[in-house]
Amino acid sequence: MFTVIIILFFTTFVGATESKRSGEKKSTSINFEDELVEGEVKKPELLYLLQKKQFNFKRLIKLRENFLPEMDQTSESIGRGGGQN
């Protein structure tokens, strides 16, 4: 009985390896060197313009009314602080 199981095991194993060899995928290569491929490149420029129009740039800009602290700091850094000449 033991020999029958071993024989079945080996025949199954051998059959599986043979099916893998016969079922290998063949690769196909296509060579375009001798062919002339003609076409036209189309750019989706209109799509980019439409997307830019829909974008809200206002949320990226922080409007301020008072720049006096920066102006004072700049005047102090160049040595003309407080209106002194």
Image (cartoon, rainbow, N blue to C red):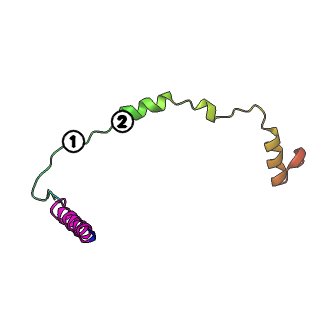
Looking at numbered disc 2 in the image, what kind of residue is underneath it? Glu
Q: Main secondary structure of the magenta part?
A: helix
Q: N-terminal of the two: label 1 or label 2? A: 1
Q: Determine the residue positioned at 18% across, 43% down.
A: 39
SS for tag 1?
loop
Q: Which residues are magenta?
A: 3-26
How far across and down, in percent of the image, does residue 12 sit?
Answer: 22, 64
- Number of marks present in the image shown: 2
How far across and down, in percent of the image, does residue 79 sit?
Answer: 85, 54
Q: Determine which residue is flagged by label 1.
A: 40
Looking at numbered disc 1 in the image, what kind of residue is underneath it? Glu
Seen as rendered, the residue at the extreme front is 1
Q: Determine the residue positioned at 22% across, 69% down.
A: 7
Position of 31 with respect to 57 (left or right) is left
Work out whether residue 85 or residue 42 is closer to the camera in this orientation and state it. 42
Q: Determine the residue positioned at 68% across, 34% down.
A: 62
SS for tag 2?
helix
57 over 79 or under it: above or below: above
Work out whether residue 43 or residue 76 is closer to the camera in this orientation and state it. 43
30 over 81 or under it: above or below: below
